[in-house]
Image (tube, rainbow, N blue to C red):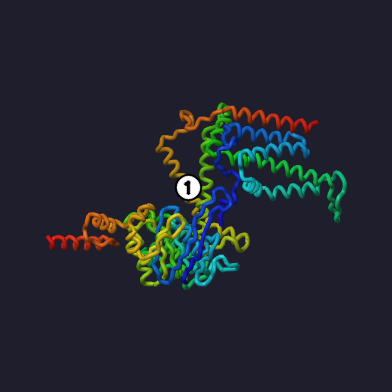
């Protein structure tokens, strides 16, 4: 009866490894670049092997428990299996391995499906390594910094970052709250698990209404507390934790560039 | 409905880096009709413990037996167990959801399948039991005061006619008057209906006057389990774990340190007053 354990995506795991100590801007831009590389390279097992090795090295350097990283992949399990199955049946390349009624499985289909699945896994891995090693606050600071150039065209960078910080901050709070209310209603004999779709949707009302009410109350209180401490938005605000780019970041970029170049070279050879 | 805990341990988030031992090797038996206080600092495991008693949480190891049913056994009907063991959560008013007080109080009994005829009388009696007027039934629970909302939430659990009533910090965040009223209602309930009441609190003052038996928890373990008078005699040990004793007892213990012949423990102000007056009289008679 605990949601919290099942949510790895977006969870921060405090630590002091080299990966943790990187500037959040480095990590943000690097995961972004990693995803770009992932889409630019032509799929091939050697290429993905190199990129996968890079991801694995990062995970090991960050001393993240592998089980926890793997659990972060669970939410995409359905998409993953769907992709593989769709590719297996829709690709008509290579040798026919298996034929049943109007369905035929080609070797190319299996290869394509697995390659795409590998791409998806790497994509999710890179983002979950980012959030697992970067505190939400540092991450939004980085996002604010990255979005700064767009301020000229009217993008409220600071406000967006603040909204994200608050949203991230309240995810665990709301989960905890939901769990508490759920337990309170279970104690009153509520049943969230049996019955048809309509019955189940209706059964959620005693959970959702109190949850919304408390979310609004919290929002009200937070706004009041921020105003009481003279919060007026971004312009004249200084930072408590100033982001600093260090040699460590340079090393990381060099390493990243080398591995990406290698992957690109191998794939277009 | 005797409740028996044997060697109960509970670990939060087992296997993750956030792993935390909430309960360690708890042995506890709660008999019918008892009025038990569970006291301990924040994080001592008291809320976890009470959630074990109606199967909302299941022990990582050990067994919880309620009325002969083991909560971890396969195919055990937890829903019926939860009707017998009513649990009022901390800040219970946060669970209110219905458009009227009556509908909210009726939620539990409806889940139980109580027939319509009986339902109305159950709702009425629960509302009266918590000391609210029946006129309140048609109002929205969200326009009531904090203390009234808390009482509606307690009524919602009472309407299920539980044989065991567990209240987790029922007075937290209430003003002194609201607190006294709720505690008085709980005491009445225990006396009149003879149900088992388990009161979780971190306030010594609250539990001292009410309970027959006091369970003190510290870091997931039961460190005292005795009548309040015996527990409060360990004033220094309680202070060491951040709990302290009721003010009435504290005054007496300070007086004893200065050589006054007063008893070690007083549960109420009145009791302390009499003890002090007596000691004062004796000293004067000797002089």
Residue drawn 84% across the image and 46% down it: A107
Q: Residue B241 location, x and y as percent?
A: 39, 53
Residue drawn 57% across the image and 44% down it: A11
Q: Is residue B116 above or below residue A121?
A: below
Q: Is residue A87 above or below residue B133?
A: above
Residue B40 appearing in the image: yes
Q: Secondary structure at mark 1?
A: helix
The mark tally for this picture is 1
Residue A174 is left or right of residue B188, and the answer is right
Q: Residue B65 location, x and y as percent?
A: 51, 68
For mark 1, name the chain.
Answer: A
Disc 1 crowd, CA 10 A, few/some/many (<14, 14-19, 20+): few
Name the outermost residue toward the left.
B287
Which of the pair A115/B155 is nearer the observer?
A115
Residue B181 appearing in the image: no
Residue drawn 44% across the image and 35% down it: A231
Quadrant in which the C terminus of chain A is drawn: top right
Which of the pair B218/A200 is nearer the observer?
B218
Residue A246 is left or right of residue B187, and the answer is right
Q: Residue A169 location, x and y as percent?
A: 51, 43
Quadrant in which the N terminus of chain A is drawn: bottom right
Residue A90 is left or right of residue B259, and the answer is right
Which of the pair A177/A11 is nearer the observer?
A11
Which of the pair B59/B35 is nearer the observer?
B59
Q: Residue B167 location, x and y as percent?
A: 42, 62
- Quarter assignment of residue B175: bottom left
- Quarter assignment of residue A145: top right
> What residue would you read off at disc 1?
A216
């Amino acid at each position: 009866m605990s949601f919290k354990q099942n949510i790895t995506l977006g969870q921060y795991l405090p630590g002091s490894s080299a990966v943790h100590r990187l500037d959040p801007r480095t990590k943000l831009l690097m995961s972004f670049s990693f995803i770009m590389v992932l889409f630019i390279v032509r799929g091939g097992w050697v290429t993905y092997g190199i990129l996968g090795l890079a991801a694995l090295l990062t995970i090991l350097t960050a001393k993240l428990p592998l089980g926890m990283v793997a659990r972060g992949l669970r939410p995409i399990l359905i998409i993953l299996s769907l992709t593989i199955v769709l590719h297996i049946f829709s690709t008509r390349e290579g040798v026919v391995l298996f034929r049943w009624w109007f369905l035929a499985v080609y070797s190319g289909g299996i290869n394509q499906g697995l390659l795409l699945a590998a791409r998806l896994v790497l994509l999710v891995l890179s983002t979950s390594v980012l959030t697992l090693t970067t505190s939400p606050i540092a991450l939004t600071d980085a996002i604010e910094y990255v979005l700064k150039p767009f301020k000229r065209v009217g993008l409220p960078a600071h406000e967006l970052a603040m909204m994200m910080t608050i949203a991230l901050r309240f995810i665990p709070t709301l989960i905890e709250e939901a769990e508490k209310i759920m337990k309170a209603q279970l104690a009153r004999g509520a049943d969230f698990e049996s019955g048809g779709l309509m019955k189940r949707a209706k059964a959620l009302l005693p959970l959702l209404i109190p949850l919304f009410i408390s979310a609004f109350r919290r929002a009200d209180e937070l706004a009041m507390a921020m105003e009481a401490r003279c919060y007026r938005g971004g312009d004249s605000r200084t930072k408590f934790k100033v982001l600093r780019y260090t040699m460590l970041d340079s090393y990381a970029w060099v390493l990243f560039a080398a591995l990406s170049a290698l992957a690109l070279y191998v794939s277009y050879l | 409905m005797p409740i028996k805990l044997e060697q109960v341990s509970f670990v939060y988030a087992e296997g993750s880096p956030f792993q935390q031992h909430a309960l360690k090797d708890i042995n506890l038996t709660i008999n019918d009709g008892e009025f038990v206080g569970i006291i301990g600092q924040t994080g001592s495991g008291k809320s976890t413990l009470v959630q074990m008693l109606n199967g909302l949480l299941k022990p990582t190891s050990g067994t919880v037996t309620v009325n002969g049913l083991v909560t971890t056994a396969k195919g055990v009907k937890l829903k019926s167990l939860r009707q017998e063991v009513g649990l009022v959560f901390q800040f219970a008013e946060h669970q209110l959801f219905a458009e009227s007080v009556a509908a909210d109080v009726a939620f539990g009994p409806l889940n139980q399948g109580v027939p319509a005829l009986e339902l109305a009388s159950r709702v009425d009696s629960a509302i009266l039991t918590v000391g609210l007027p029946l006129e309140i039934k048609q109002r929205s629970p969200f326009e009531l005061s904090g203390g009234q909302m808390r009482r509606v939430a307690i009524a919602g659990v009472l309407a299920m006619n539980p044989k065991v009533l567990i209240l987790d910090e029922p007075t937290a965040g209430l003003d002194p008057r609201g607190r006294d009223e709720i505690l008085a209602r709980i005491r009445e309930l225990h006396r009149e209906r003879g149900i088992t009441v388990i009161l979780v609190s971190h306030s010594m003052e609250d539990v001292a006057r009410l309970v027959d038996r006091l369970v003190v928890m510290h870091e997931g373990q039961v460190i005292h389990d005795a009548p309040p008078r015996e527990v409060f005699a360990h004033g220094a040990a309680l202070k060491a774990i951040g709990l302290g004793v009721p003010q009435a007892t504290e005054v007496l213990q300070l007086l004893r340190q200065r050589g006054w012949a007063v008893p070690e423990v007083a549960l109420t102000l009145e009791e302390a007053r009499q003890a002090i007056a007596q000691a004062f009289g004796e000293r004067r008679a000797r002089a």
